[in-house]
Image: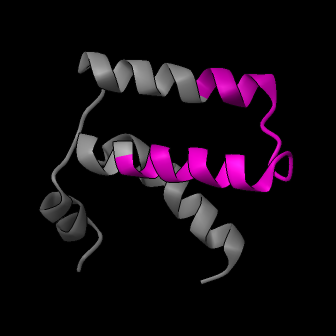
Amino acid sequence: MSTSEKKEFLREHLDSIDEKFLNTFYELMLFQLESQGDNINFTSEQKKELELRMQNHEKGASKSYSWDEVKTSIGR
């Protein structure tokens, strides 16, 4: 799978991951950003969108799925 395909897959499924996985992914992303310094630059619009999605998830305003449900939905 190419890098662009992986990114697209993540975009498509980000709203449907469960809270535990979302938090793990979020922490990993923060670690990666801190480790790389400014190698990954999000636009202010992207940062706002990430924050909005996190807030919606924490408030229960977005749909969450268990890991088993995610695996089932992608046919694994």
Q: How is the image coloured?
A: one colour
x, y (%) of residue 20? 25, 46
Q: Is residue 33 magenta?
A: yes
| Residue in the foreground of this view, choosing between 47 and 3 | 47
43 relative to 31, above or below: above
Between 52 and 75, which is closer to the camera in this rendering? 52
- Queried whether the magenta region covers residue 51, the answer comes back as no
Residue positioned 28% across, 15% down in the render:
59
Is 40 displayed left or right of 33 in the figure? Answer: right
Q: In the figure, 31 relative to 9: above or below? A: above
Residue under the image location 83 percent in, 42 percent down: 41
Q: Main secondary structure of the magenta part?
A: helix
Q: Residue at x 78, y 55 (%)?
A: 36
Quarter-of-image position of residue 19: top left
- The image quadrant where one finds the N terminus is bottom right
Above or below: residue 46 compared with residue 8: above
Q: Residue farthest to the front?
A: 35
Res 32 visible: yes
- In this view, the residue in front, 27 or 50, is 27
Quarter holding the C terminus? bottom left
Q: How many marks?
A: 0
Q: Which residues are magenta?
A: 24-49
Give the image location of residue 54, x and y in percent.
43, 27
